[in-house]
Image: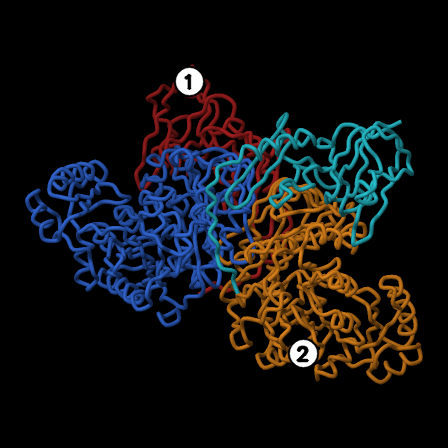
Chain colours: A cyan, B orange, C blue, D red
C-alpha cells in the first residue's frame, strides 16, 4: 500500500550557473521574490526592498508573495503573477485562459507580432491551445509591442502577462 | 500508479489531497483562481496554475480550464475533492475522454445515483428500505394527491436533481401539496434545470446516519462503518461523529450491509457515502448516495485508521483494496466540528476577512484539517468553512471533553466564526446525552 | 480525585499537562518565570503565578517558591513534568510533607533508582542483565584496574549520580583508565556533588531501546512496549520511534518483561522508563530508569492509544490501572522528531528569538505538541526544544514518508532550527533501513 | 476512567457589578487589556489606545498582554504584571517572593505602614507568608508610601507591585 521510501542524497552543491540564470530571469520579469524548495534544497531569493511579511487585507484575495515551484520549468509561470508590485512596468496583454502559448499560426509561419509591431484591439497577437483547440488571442487594446514576455510553446496561466505594449 | 495528479479543488480539501499524494510519492498540480493566489497550500504542490478569476463559475467550475491545466501539467489523473465538479458526471466523462482518469466512480453510476428517482429504484432493487412514496416522478398534481392519500400526510416534495434542501417542500395536507408541488418544481427547474419532482412520506425528526463505502474495480466492496450527522442547520452538517450514538448494534450492522448491497447493485466504485434517515422507532430509510469524498471523511479515517484519500487514488489507479471487510476495525469515538467563517450572532452571515490571530488546539487525539494560518484572508467567493476540528478518543464522553478543551484553546481573531455556537452545542445536555434529531440545532440555537 | 493541580514546569509539557487536566475536569495552577510571562499556554490554566526571574535557578528550580504557589493556589497535587524538579526526590518529599501529592514515584524508589549503583543492584536482583562491571563504586584506581582486567577493555567510567553524559569517560587501556578515573570523579563532584564513579564494559555502537512502564499503588505493573531512541547527538535524543525496528520479537518481549520485573522489584509506581542498550549481537543491558514522564511519551501514546499524562494523574490519585497487560495493543508505527531552536550550521548553537512566520504540518496521523505560535519568542534561558512532531501510520515506511511530507510543509522563520538536519536524517539511507546505532548521528551529520 | 461530561448551562447574564469592579481594578493598575474566558463566558476589555497585536521581540521574555484568569479572585494577580506599560506610575515596592501578603504582624497589631508613612531601606513594610514561614519584607528603598496596592491576606506573585512610594 505504501510506496517504498526512497533515499535522496544529492551531493551536488548549489549550481551557481542555475542561480545566475534564475537571477537573470528574475530581473527580466521583475520578480521580487522567489522560493524554490524540494526535500533537500531550498532557494530563497529576494530582490529590492524587503516586503513586510504580514499580508494586508484586500477585498479580493491576496497581495501575493510570488508562487514557488520545483518542477521543470524551474520557475512556475505563477511566479510572474499579474499583481501590482510584480507586474512589468507599463501596460500588458494578459492570457485570457490557461494553455500553451504559440507565437505563430504554424511552425512555418512568421510570428503574429514582433517587438515594434503596432497592434489594434482586433489584431491577432498569438494563439493559446487548450484542449486541442487553438484559440486566436486578440490584442484587446491598441499600441506598440515593446516586449514579448513568453516564448513559443510555453505553458501560460490565466492572467499571465504575455506582451508589454506602449499604448497608443 | 499515477505519477502526477491534478487537484481540481481549493482550500482544505486541496491541501488534504496534496498531502496524500506527497506521501504516496505522487506529484501534484494545483489550480487556483485569482482569489486564492498566494495561499500556502499552493506552494506545497509541485506546480500551480491560475485558471481564472475569483468567481467559481469562471474558474473552479470551468471544465475546459481545468482540462487545459491538466494537459499543460501533464497529469494522469484528476482528483475533484468535494463540491465544485466532484459530482459532475459530464466532467468525469470529459476527463476520461482525454485519457485523464477521474478519481471517482464510473460515469453511469454517477448519473444513476445522482438522479434521486433512479437511485431510489436501484435501492429498492437491492432490497434497501426507502421512504414510502411515489413510484418515480409525479407527472401531475392529481397523481401527487393520490400518492399522498396512499402514504399519508405529511409528505415531502423533493426534486430528483436536488441537493442542499433546494426544491424541497413539506406538505401537511392536500392544499399545501398542490401549492408546494408547483413551487418546488419551479425552484428545481431554476436551480438544476430539471423540474422533475417526486413525493415521499415526511419522516418527522429523524436522525441522519450515513455509511462510508469503498469499492475497487475488482468487485470488492466494503463499508467503513457509519457516521451520525444529525447536528445540522439548514441541511448543512455542523458536527459528525462515529460510531452513531444510541444506535442498536444489530441495526447498525443492517444499515451498513444495506449500503454495501446498494453500492454493489449500482456498479459504483471508489469512495462514496450512502445516507439514511432513522426515525424514532428505529426504522431506517435510504435517502441518497454522495458519489464523492465527503467533508467529514476524517471521522472515519480516525476510527478505522484507513486513509480514504489514498484509497481513492489507489482504487482509481486500478489497485485492489488491501483489506477485506473483516480486517476493518472500529476503534474509539471520533467527532468532527466544522468551523465556519460565519457570524452566529448575525444569522450566520458569512464573515470573510483576514485572520489576525490564530491559536490552534492540539495534543493527543486532536486533528485540525485546514489550509488557514495567521494572516490568511478568507475570501468571500467560496464556502465559509475554515477548517475541521476532529478529535479521537476511547469513548464519546472523553471525545466531548477533549472537544470542549480544544474549544477553550481555540482563538481566531479578525473574523467572526461559529466557535461560540460550537461551545454551546458541545455543552448542551441534549447533545451530550444524544437526545437529538436533524431539527435539534435549528430548534435550539 | 484531585480538583486542582499545580503544573511545576513550563513550555510544551506544561501545556500538555494543562490539556490532560482540562479533559479530566481538573483545574490547573500554572507557575511562570518573568521570561515566560504572556505565553499563551498560561492563559489556558485556571490560575497562573509568577514565581521568579528568568533563570531557572531563581524560579522553576526553587522548591519553596513552587510550594508557596501551590499553597496560595490551593492545589492537592503537583505535576513536575520532565526536567527541572521532576527527578528531585527532595522536592517530592517536601510536596508530600505539605500534604500535596507529588505526581510521580515514591521517594525511596526515586532515590534508589536515581543512584546508578543502587539501581544496578536492584536490576541484578530482578534478574535484569546489566553491563559487566564493578560491583558498586570503585574506591581507588587499583580496584578499577582489577575490574577492567576482569571485564576487558574498553571500559566506561560512569558517575553514580550522572546524567546527560557528564562524569563519563571511555578508557581503552590502563593508562587512560587511570587518567580518566580522576577526571570523571572530579567532574561528577562538580556537577552532582557526588564524586562516586563505577566501571562498566564499554559497549561499542549500541542501540538505545527503552520501555515505557505504568505502575499503580495496587501492585499492578504493565509495560507499554518499547521505543528506539538511537538517533541522538551528544546524548540528546533527536528521533524516537516505536516499535523498535529490526528488534526480534522474542527479544522485544524479554526486554519488556525485564522492565516490568525491575520496576516491581524497586517498588516503583506511576510512569517511568527503563533504558537499555542492545549490542550488535542482540545482547541487551539495563542502563537506567527515568523516574518521570519523558519528552518522547507521545510515541507510546500513539501506538497504544493510552494517555500517559492522564494515567500519571489517575495513579497518583490512587486509582487502579484501567487495563491489564493483555489489554494493551501496539498498533502501527509512531515516530517523533524533536524540533529545536538550534542552528545546525553553527555547531547547534541555541538560537533564541521571535518566530516571525510559522506554517505547521498537519493531516491524518500528524500531531505537533508545542506551546509556540507565530509571534512567540523563544527565550534564551531554557532548553531549546520548540516542539515535537509525531506521526503515526500503519507502517514505518509510511511514517517516514509522512514525516518527510511534514518537513516539506513545515516553515519556521525568524530563528534557526534543526529542521534542515531533520530533512537530512529522514532522507538518509541508513536511517531508512535502520542501519544505525547511537553514534550514527554524530558520525554522519 | 473519564470524568462524566457535565452540562454547563449558566443562565445568569453579565454581572455589571463585577464588571465595574474589574474596570476599577484595571484603572487602578493601569491595565490596558484583559481577556477572561471559560466555557460559557468570555470577557474582553481594552482600555486606552489600541495596542498592536504583534509582540515586539524583546531580548528577555515578552511584552505582555496581561494574563487572563477565570478562578476567584476574579482577576489573577498576574494581570497586574510589572511590565512597562502596565506598571502604576511612580516607584513601586514589589513582592520578592510568591505567597500571602500580610500588612501587620498579627490581626491585633497595627499595619506596619500606612499611606503617608516615611520608610527607609530597612523599614519592615509587610510580611509575606510562604510555606508557613512569615518573611518580613523590607522597603529596600526610602520614601513616602503613597498607595497600598494589595489588601491584607491577598495572594501575591513574584514581582507584583505592593506599594507605590514617592522616593525621597
Q: Residues within 10 Å of mark 2 (few under 14, many from 20)?
A: some
Image quadrant holding the C terminus of chain C, namely top left
Occupied quadrant, residue C344:
top left
* Mark 1 closeness class: few <14, some 14–19, many ≥20 residues within 10 Å: some
Label disc, if present, on residue C228 of the rendered structure: none
Residue extending farthest to the top is D168
SS for dot 2: helix
Residue D157 visible = no
* Residue C98 position in % (x across, y down): 30, 49
Using the image, determine if residue C376 lies above or below residue C79. above
Question: Toward the viewer: C144 or B405?
Answer: C144
- Residue C70 vs A86, above or below: the answer is below
Marks 1 and 2 share the same chain: no
Answer yes or no: is residue C287 visible. yes
- Disc 1 vs disc 2: which is toward the camera? 2
Separation (CA) of disc 1 from disc 2 = 89 Å
**Quadrant in which the N terminus of chain C is drawn:** bottom left
Determine whether B151 is above or below C309 in the image.
below
**Most foreground residue, C119 or B109:** B109
Residue C224 image offset from top left, x and y in percent: 36, 63
The residue that mark 2 highlights is: B264
Query: How many labels were placed on the picture?
Result: 2
- The residue labelled by disc 1 is D143
Q: Between residues C89 and C420, which one lies in front from this camera angle?
A: C420
Horizontal side of residue B195 vs C296, given as left or right: right
The chain identifier of the residue carrying mark 2 reads B
Q: Left or right of B317: which side holds A136?
A: right
Q: Where is residue A27 drawn, in percent x and y?
A: 66, 29
Examine the image and state in which quarter residue A118 appears.
Answer: top right
- Which residue is pictured at 48% across the width and 25% down the height? D147
Residue at position x 62%, y 63% in the image: B313
Chain letter for mark 1, please.
D
Amino acid at each position: 500500500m505504501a510506496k517504498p521510501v526512497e533515499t535522496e542524497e544529492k551531493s551536488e552543491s548549489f549550481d551557481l550557473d542555475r542561480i545566475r540564470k534564475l537571477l537573470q530571469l528574475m530581473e527580466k520579469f521583475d520578480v521580487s521574490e522567489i522560493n524554490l524548495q524540494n526535500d533537500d534544497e531550498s532557494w530563497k531569493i529576494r530582490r529590492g526592498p524587503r516586503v513586510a511579511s504580514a499580508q494586508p487585507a484586500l477585498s479580493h484575495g491576496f497581495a501575493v508573495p510570488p508562487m514557488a515551484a520545483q518542477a521543470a520549468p524551474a520557475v512556475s509561470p505563477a511566479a510572474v503573477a499579474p499583481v501590482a508590485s510584480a507586474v512589468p512596468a507599463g501596460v500588458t496583454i494578459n492570457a485570457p485562459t490557461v494553455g500553451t502559448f504559440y507565437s505563430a499560426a504554424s511552425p512555418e509561419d512568421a510570428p503574429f507580432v514582433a517587438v515594434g509591431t503596432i497592434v489594434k484591439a482586433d489584431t491577432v497577437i498569438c494563439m493559446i491551445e487548450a484542449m486541442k483547440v487553438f484559440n486566436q488571442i486578440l490584442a484587446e487594446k491598441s499600441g506598440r509591442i515593446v516586449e514579448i514576455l513568453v516564448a513559443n510553446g510555453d505553458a501560460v496561466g490565466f492572467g499571465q502577462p504575455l506582451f508589454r505594449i506602449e499604448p497608443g | 500508479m499515477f505519477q502526477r495528479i491534478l487537484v481540481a479543488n481549493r482550500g482544505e480539501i486541496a491541501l488534504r489531497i496534496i498531502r496524500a499524494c506527497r506521501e504516496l510519492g505522487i506529484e501534484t498540480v494545483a489550480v487556483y483562481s485569482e482569489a486564492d493566489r498566494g495561499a500556502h497550500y499552493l506552494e506545497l504542490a509541485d506546480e500551480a496554475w491560475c485558471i481564472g478569476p475569483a468567481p467559481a463559475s469562471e474558474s473552479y467550475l470551468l471544465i475546459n480550464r481545468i482540462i487545459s491545466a491538466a494537459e499543460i501539467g501533464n497529469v494522469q489523473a484528476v482528483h475533484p475533492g468535494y463540491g465544485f465538479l466532484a459530482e459532475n458526471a459530464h466532467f468525469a466523462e470529459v476527463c476520461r475522454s482525454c485519457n485523464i482518469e477521474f478519481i471517482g466512480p464510473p460515469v453511469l453510476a454517477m448519473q444513476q445515483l445522482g438522479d434521486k428517482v433512479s437511485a431510489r429504484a436501484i435501492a429498492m432493487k437491492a432490497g434497501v428500505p426507502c421512504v414510502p412514496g411515489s413510484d418515480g416522478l409525479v407527472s401531475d398534481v392529481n397523481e401527487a394527491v393520490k400518492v399522498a392519500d396512499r402514504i399519508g400526510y405529511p409528505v415531502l416534495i423533493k426534486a430528483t436533481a436536488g441537493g442542499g434542501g433546494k426544491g424541497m417542500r413539506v406538505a401537511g395536507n392536500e392544499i399545501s401539496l398542490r401549492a408546494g408541488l408547483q413551487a418546488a418544481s419551479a425552484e428545481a427547474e431554476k436551480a438544476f434545470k430539471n423540474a422533475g419532482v417526486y413525493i415521499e412520506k415526511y419522516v418527522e425528526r429523524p436522525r441522519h446516519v450515513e455509511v462510508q463505502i469503498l469499492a475497487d474495480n475488482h468487485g470488492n466492496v466494503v463499508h467503513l462503518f457509519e457516521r451520525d450527522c444529525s447536528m445540522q442547520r439548514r441541511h448543512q452538517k455542523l458536527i459528525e461523529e462515529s460510531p452513531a450514538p444510541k444506535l442498536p448494534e444489530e441495526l447498525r450492522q443492517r444499515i451498513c450491509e444495506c449500503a454495501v448491497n446498494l453500492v454493489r447493485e449500482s456498479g459504483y466504485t471508489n469512495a462514496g457515502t450512502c445516507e439514511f434517515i432513522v426515525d424514532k422507532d428505529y426504522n431506517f430509510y435510504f435517502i441518497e448516495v454522495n458519489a464523492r469524498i465527503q467533508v467529514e471523511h476524517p471521522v472515519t479515517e480516525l476510527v478505522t485508521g484507513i486513509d480514504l484519500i489514498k484509497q481513492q487514488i489507489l482504487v482509481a489507479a486500478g489497485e485492489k483494496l488491501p483489506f477485506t471487510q473483516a480486517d476493518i476495525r472500529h476503534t474509539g469515538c471520533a467527532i468532527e466540528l466544522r468551523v465556519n467563517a460565519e457570524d452566529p450572532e448575525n444569522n450566520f452571515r458569512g464573515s470573510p476577512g483576514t485572520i489576525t490571530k490564530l491559536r490552534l488546539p492540539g495534543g493527543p487525539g486532536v486533528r485540525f484539517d485546514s489550509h488557514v494560518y495567521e494572516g490568511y484572508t478568507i475570501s468571500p467567493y467560496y464556502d465559509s468553512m475554515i477548517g475541521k476540528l476532529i478529535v479521537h478518543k476511547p469513548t464519546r464522553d472523553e471525545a466531548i471533553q477533549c472537544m470542549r478543551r480544544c474549544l477553550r484553546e481555540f482563538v481566531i481573531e479578525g473574523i467572526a466564526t461559529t466557535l461560540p455556537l460550537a461551545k454551546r452545542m458541545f455543552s448542551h445536555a441534549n447533545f451530550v446525552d444524544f437526545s437529538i434529531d436533524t431539527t435539534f440545532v435549528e430548534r435550539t440555537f
